[in-house]
Amino acid sequence: MKNVTIILNREFASYFTTPVAYVFILVFLVLSSAFTFYLGQFYERGQADLLPFFNFHPWLYLFLVPSVSMRLWSEERASGSIELLLTLPITLWEAILGKFLAAWLFTGLSLLGTFPLWLSVNYLGEPDNGAIAASYVGSWFMAGAFLAVGCCLSALTKSQIVAFILTGTVCLMLVLAGFPLVLNFFQGWVPAMILDLIAGLSIIAHFMAISKGVLALTDVIYFVSMIGLWLTLTRLVLQAKSAD
Amino acid sequence: MIEVQNLTKQFGSTTVVNDLSFELGPGSVLGFLGPNGAGKSTTMKMITGFLTPSSGSVHIQGYDISSHRQAAQAEMGYLPEGAPSYEEMTVAAFLKFIAKIRGARGALIQQWVDRVTDTVSLRAVLHQRIETLSKGYKRRVGLAQALIHDPSILILDEPTDGLDPNQKHQVRQMILDLSDQKIVIISTHILEEVSAVCSRAMIINAGEIVLDDTPEGLCQRAEGHLSVSLRINGVGDEALSQACSQLPQCGRVALIDGGGVLIYPAEALGDPLAALQEMMRANHWQAEWIQQHEGQLDELFRDATGGRLQ
């Protein structure tokens, strides 16, 4: 665990020694506010909640999270530092967890940067702060799931652009899995059980369930297992590359 | 102790390292010599646990790198090819990070960083970002991270690449200073480096060990070892060349551009000098000049990697 913390600290600090962190946080704050006020009709709805804010998160994360995750392993591979990191006396899990947690904490920090919106709704009315807190947790879990996907896919290639596109595509599929567009395509020729499974994979469905204010165990398990699955796949990819 | 047994690495259908075996004990500096693509770096990557061998085994101080990877890696310091690092970090922050991962805690972290900073002369750039440093300094940062935990084994992939002659000399001196108690493996294209620092040299070509000896031993195997060049007053080079060809101790005879004859020893009979002197005495010939040569490593390298000795 000590090694995870050492790697986490190094990775987290590295976000702030390059413009990546500042650009990401700025873009996230500007876009999430713009979506909330213009597309989400924050004032016109006349309700003191943050639904217009959280509703856009899955779509915002589709391109913002891959921009963080694309560098996790691709950059190490391109610069050759992966050879240094993986010949230090640490396990693959320690390296993967350290990097992933740093990225996850970083997106969490960006999310916390939106607190003026929370202050605003509390000033304007009496929102259900429990639901807002649950939505923040749900949004952070969703970012974690996207990051885990990106972590795995960036281990596949030394090109950050390729990692970005692959991650965006896979995350889009995970978001769309519960949509009629996708389900109708499978309806009729796949067994009902598989259809349920595809619908169950939908990130939006689980995120929406949490943002209603109910932090159900099934949704938490969904996100935790999604993160666990993709990080395990990351380990397999790194092992396969070492034997390649 | 490093024990490498039947190490083989295949990428697809290409065999990059083929059945490599050797052992190294304390106080040895092994030089891996070979042309680009010979398998030097791949071998080092397998020894350090970055690549998994297709077959064969590596034991580092008794630890099998595949089953006890961390314990084996803790014994080694490794400078990968090109000296990669986290370039957005300052030298001090980077070295502290490596020290912590290598197990230093508390005041020991700073002690390790201070010691290694002095060893490789990095103090002037300690608070600079690595990306702003010259190639030579970046290489030294790479050496510093490899040395930081004072490992018993050092694996250095082209440690002097990109350094100026003074820096090269410093690094070689440092390797020599360290070599008493440690096991060092270096890979290089620079042949003078092998003579300067290595106690053992291995020429690798197409993934196989072609020659394995001390640098002096390798020089003695070069075709030109003990060859003699000479010119005789009043005797034409053609006639001299013909006379020399008659001697059983002489092998190939070549005319030198600009005058004189170069005589290689006949492989089985060794030094041709005495026979040549005897011939000169018998014919009452006076040498205008005569010189005997030692074998050159570059000559042997070309022979060994060009395929002639295989």
Image (spheres, coloured by chain):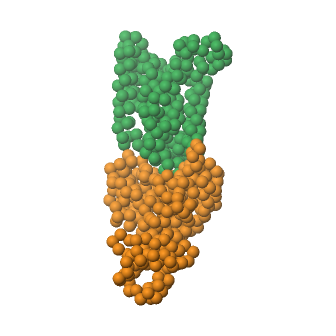
Chain colours: A green, B orange
- Position of B299 relative to B57 (above/below): below
Name the one closer to the observer, B257 or B74. Answer: B257
Name the one closer to the observer, A72 or B83. Answer: B83
Name the one closer to the observer, B92 or B105. Answer: B92
| A133 lies left or right of B23 | left
Q: Could you tell me which residue is drawn at 43 percent across and 33 percent down? A: A161
Q: Could you tell me which residue is drawn at 45 percent across and 32 percent down? A: A162
- Coordinates of residue B40 in the picture (x, y in percent): 51, 56
Is residue A218 among the parts visible in the rendering? Answer: yes
Q: Could you tell me which residue is drawn at 57 percent across and 57 percent down? A: B208
Is residue B109 among the parts visible in the rendering? Answer: no
| A169 lies left or right of B237 | right
- Coordinates of residue B294 in the picture (x, y in percent): 45, 75
Q: Quadrant of the N terminus of chain B?
A: bottom right
Q: Could you tell me which residue is drawn at 50 percent across and 32 percent down? A: A150
Total numbered labels:
0
- Coordinates of residue B21 in the picture (x, y in percent): 61, 60
- Coordinates of residue B36 in the picture (x, y in percent): 47, 54
- Position of B274 relative to B92 (above/below): below
- Position of B137 relative to B257 (above/below): above
Answer with the quarter of the image where residue A180 lies: top right
Q: Quadrant of the C terminus of chain B?
A: bottom right
| B291 lies left or right of A203 | left
